[in-house]
Image: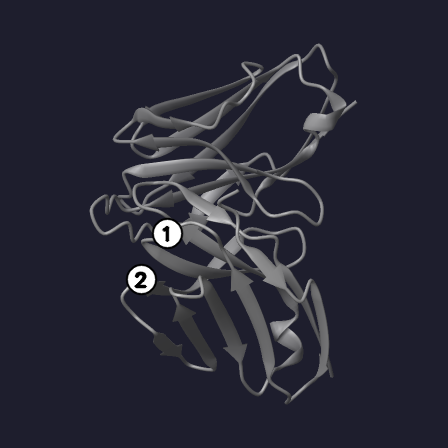
Amino acid sequence: SQQGEEDPQALSIQEGENATMNCSYKTSINNLQWYRQNSGRGLVHLILIRSNEREKHSGRLRVTLDTSKKSSSLLITASRAADTASYFCALNTGGFKTIFGAGTRLFVKA
Amino acid sequence: DTEVTQTPKHLVMGMTNKKSLKCEQHMGHRAMYWYKQKAKKPPELMFVYSYEKLSINESVPSRFSPECPNSSLLNLHLHALQPEDSALYLCASSQVARLSGANVLTFGAGSRLTVL
């Protein structure tokens, strides 16, 4: 399956702590993206990292990509209650096919 | 305008009904997508339209029939659905960036479908 596998499946932390989510995959990719989904709503794009990049930052988000290990991680620093959501990695192998990983449900306690 | 608008937000239909889900975007995106999402699962790709032509059909049953009347609109026609088709149906759009593959998706809020 091209689908990414994410761990942990669920993560509960206190406000102010950092949250790290991991995504592993099996196929070659063109780029890897991370999306957030609040309960039962549409997904929001967070960050994209191309296959020739190793690390990207956007505000409190830091994404790493290790193509040799076929894995990526998303770090959210200084988490807030509003960060409570499901987070999905999404693999693009070229063209229009973007396949989502299983997701990590993050709960940030105030 | 950076929105993808989906209607209706909720839809309940019987197995013999015919209904349609609608999606509209005015961002000038030339690729539009339908995804299906079951509870606590990731979105699953169903169809992709590029320049109003069907580009990808992920072996979706024929009871789901997509249509792209113009570059801003995407429909999903539903007929003879099964209860297991109950899900959140998400529409998305993106610019066409075929070579770089950097198709960043902008999603609508979804249409929650219940099939009785």
Residue B97 location in percent, x, y? Answer: 23, 47
Residue located beneath label 2 in the image: A51
* Residue A85 placement: quadrant: bottom right
Badge 1 and badge 2 in a common chain? yes
User: How packed is label 1: few (under 14 Cα within 10 Å), some, or many (20 or more)?
Assistant: some
Q: On what subunit does the disc labeled 2 rest?
A: A
Q: Residue at x 53, y 42 (%)?
A: A1
Query: Of residues A70 and B41, which is closer to you in this image?
Result: A70
Residue B58 x %, y %: 47, 28
Residue furthest to the left in view is: B99
Which SS class for mark 1? Answer: loop
Q: Amino acid at mark 2?
A: Ser
Q: Which residue is mark 1?
A: A28
In the structure shown, which secondary structural element does the residue marked by tag 2 occupy? loop
The amino acid beneath tag 1 is: Ser
Task: Relative to A2, say whether A10 is above or below.
Answer: below
